[in-house]
Amino acid sequence: MDGMNVSLRLEQLDRGEAFRYMGYKGGEINGSILKIADECEEALLKTIRPGMVYRVFDTEVCEDGIGVKNTSLIFKGGDIARHLSGCGRCVMMCVTLSGETDRLIRFYEAESMEKALIADALASAAVEQVCEKAEALIRSEVGSYNYTWRFSPGYGDFPLDIQRDFLNVTDAQKRIGLNITQSNILIPRKSVTAVMGISTEVIPKGRRGCGCCNLKDTCEYRRGGSHCGF
């Protein structure tokens, strides 16, 4: 599955998630902030054109990490190895909102940093919403297996410098226009790459959420009784 997909389109943005990104922990939000959020959400929904691409690969444990069969790619790091333990296959997925969304946020940065901050948080919530839709679509197409949660390069000791090879293997540049800078920043910025393990066996709960995160003991979300969404 690749390209712009109408089933990933959003009708509204998750404001609760966006305000959480901005540090709000409940309570009434200032009316002027809500008004700006209204304006930003309306504008963002006009620019968001979600794209996704994914590929499914067999995996194998090798000396240097987890090998992705039929490619030269090796997932290095103890965290990703534990994440994929017992999974004979994996999904490599890439999701992006659009270059237009990036341009809108840059426009707001020149106009008002407050507006830019709100738009950026709403866009971050939007890319998570699209990831959730993409994951559901992947599950429906790949089949009724057991899946781990999404694990992205840069989490724990899963090196960020794998991003370029990740995009090459998934052909994300050609399929959805997803690129990367020399410093391993995804372009468009509101984009996500992630790995999900696939197993025929039940996956322990700790590998489907906060339990395997290196930040679980200091996470502000967990302290507030919630989670980051990843």
Image (tube, rainbow, N blue to C red):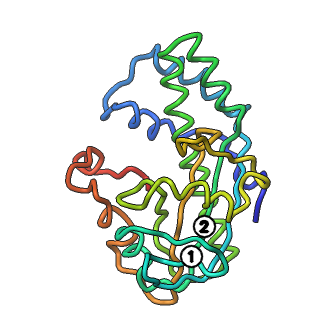
The location of residue 144, given as percent across then percent down, is 60, 82
In the image, residue 55 sits, relative to residue 213, either above or below, namely below
User: Residue beneath label 2, please?
Assistant: 92
Asked if the residues shown at circle 1 and circle 2 are in contact, with their CB atoms under 8 angstroms apart, the answer is: yes
Q: Residue at x 30, y 35 (%)?
A: 25
Between 29 and 168, which is closer to the camera in this rendering?
168
Disc 2 residue type (three-letter): Met
Relative to 69, does residue 72 appear above or below in the rendering? above
Left or right of residue 169: residue 148:
left
What is the quadrant of the C terminus in the image?
bottom left
Q: How many marks?
A: 2
Of residues 214 and 200, the one drawn nearer to the viewer in this rendering: 214
Label 1: which residue? Answer: 90
Position in image of residue 167 (x %, y %) = 65, 57
Quadrant the N terminus occupies: bottom right
Nearer to us in this view, 90 or 46: 90
